[in-house]
Image (cartoon, rainbow, N blue to C red):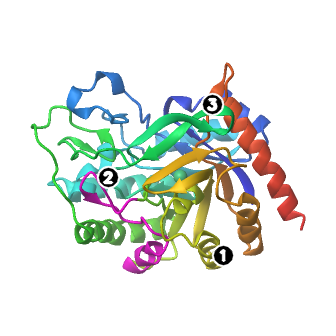
Amino acid sequence: MKLGYALGGVGITRDNLKFARQAGVTHVVLHLTDYAYKRDELPDRYRGAAGFTGAPKLWDYEFLSGVKKMVNDEGLVLEALENFNPYFWHDVLLDGPRKHEQMETLKQIIRAVGKSGIPTFGYNFSLAGVWGLTSVPEARGGALTAAFLNPEQKPIPNGMVWNMVYDPAAPVGDIGTVSQEQIWQRAEYFLSEILPVAEEAGVVMAAHPDDPPMTTIRGTARLVHQPRLYQRLFDLVPSANSKAELCVGTLAEMTETDLYEWVETYANAGKVAYVHLRNVRGRVPNFVEVFVDEGDTDILRILRILHRAGYDGLITPDHAPAMNCPAPGHAAMAFQLGYLKALMKVVMSE
Ligand SMILES: [Mn+2]
């Protein structure tokens, strides 16, 4: 097992890479999108959106190899990219008029990822995205943290998907409801197109479960909102390059959780691409993200199961409660990284 760390958007800096290296991280996952871009400039009807997608340049070989070089220059390995910017694939998610054209763009991106020598691409096939979390002082010592408290759900306005706005000038109205059958059909189209390209490019496509794992959010069905639905996803378009981005926190929030059994089964099957590790208290429709060493999940047990199953991939800390100090996010991450690094050492010496 390797200690991983995720950086995103404006947080992808030399200093943050050095911070990771100093904490003992060896492998990095990058979110190339600045999810909070122009959040405060969006029209009122998009209140609560993470941000605006902008119109990013294609993630081509030249761009990605430059990003990879920056990571390598700091003594780190670039293991994975996580999430397409919704700008590149909103109509694939929404079954819109540009879906075939956008599918070709996604294929170009995956080919460039492979050519750049980045082994894994994480994705989250979701319409509502990560939505509905609020900040509450409910982690240990009153630390500010994310919680899902079953908020009122309004429909997703036009021009928005994945909790980001891609067209602020879209006509007034909303995208309506999307059924389970529709979301699985759309996922099947996406996977049947992307997986052959990923196989040829030597890239593993890693699916993140739906966070929060409700059956529907804002009227739109969720894809992997119970652990058992991963099997349905793997069977939908079978491929050795189709794996799980195992978000332990999200699985623990699911109502039918057989978390330890799931981890054992799919780690043994070689279906875990990489791991997001956080702890939570509660399940949908009410949960609170807490420090990695409190909450409902036995993190040491998870690491033991992974190691015994021969899992040799990344363990990356997920979201963490903010700590009261001048650098709340960095302090929280340093704590999580140190804790995980120590547990990994224990487990790997057994
Ligand atoms: Mn996650």
Residue located 65% across and 50% down the image: 316
Q: Amino acid at mark 2?
A: Thr
Question: Can you identify the residue that label 1 sits on?
Answer: 264
The correct choice, above or below, for 201 with respect to 50 in the image is: below
Residue 325 visible to an observer of this rendering: yes
The magenta region covers 214-236
Where residue 238 appears, as percent x and y from the top left, is 43, 79
SS at badge 3: helix
Where residue 347 appears, as percent x and y from the top left, is 83, 63
- Answer with mark 3 or mark 1, whichever residue precedes in sequence: 1
Viewer-proximal residue among 188 and 220: 220
Residue that sits furthest to the right in the current view: 349
The numbered disc on residue 329 is 3
Where residue 51 appears, as percent x and y from the top left, is 35, 33
The CA span between labels 3 and 1 is 31 Å
Disc 3 versus disc 2: nearer the observer: 3
Question: Can you identify the residue that label 2 sits on?
Answer: 105
Residue located 23% across and 44% down the image: 154
